[in-house]
Image (cartoon, grey):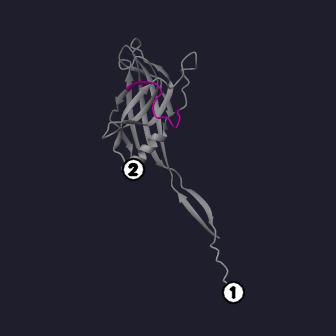
Amino acid sequence: MIKEQEYRESFSGIGTVTIKPFKILEDGTRQYLPITKHNLIVEAGRASLIDLLIGAKKKKLSYIRWGKGGALTFPDGDPLNPLTVNDKDVDIATFLLDKPLSPYNRVSPTEVEYTETLICDEVNDDVNEAVMLFEDDDTQERSIFARITFPTVRLTIEQGTGIEIRWVFNFSKAEENPIDFEESPTVTPPADSTT
């Protein structure tokens, strides 16, 4: 038997999100309460990356969609305990607002960062979920890339509250994984002894 070793390269894609609810103080400064979580680059988002790699579609990350379906409300549940993001998610649970993304910061060749802000003048409601959206260059159709849920932040004009989200996508090379396998030898049929 011939023993061979194959190496499969894998790449890891992760999004880290820092959510910073804030209150605007009388002097105009912001008082922050940061929360850091990992988001999920969902299946539809990974499929879009493949479309981009093979040139099947022309699209780019263009929008953030804010929502309020990322945690239950009283008496059904705890609004500070966000629901789990599912890999099959294709949108947020409850729509509030789409906003064009601010210019990105290219942190490294494999890392990009977006910082987005939502204030009570734009949404006077609870917020506890967000998605990053691709927009197709030809059809302007929007599709999900990644989703995050977080503890509910109440945006109210009376309290002058808002939320800042720092969303970082990092694609790095994972370790090579050696895979051993054995190849069965080719069996040679016996010579025909009748000839």
Residue most toward the bottom?
195
Q: Which x, y percent locates residue 155?
A: 43, 18
Front in this rendered view, residue 32 or 7: 7
Q: Which residues are magenta?
A: 85-97
Q: Residue at x 33, y 32 (%)?
A: 102
Tell me if I can see residue 43 in this picture. Answer: yes
Residue most toward the right?
193
- Which mark sits nearer the N-terminus, 2 or 1? 2
Q: Is residue 91 left or right of residue 7?
A: left
Q: Residue at x 45, y 46 (%)?
A: 171
Q: Is residue 63 left or right of residue 195?
A: left
Residue 91 part of the magenta segment: yes
Q: Residue at x 46, y 24 (%)?
A: 94
Quarter of the image with the N terminus is bottom right
Residue located beneath label 1 in the image: 194
Label 1: how many Cα within 10 Å (few below 14, some 14–19, many 20+): few
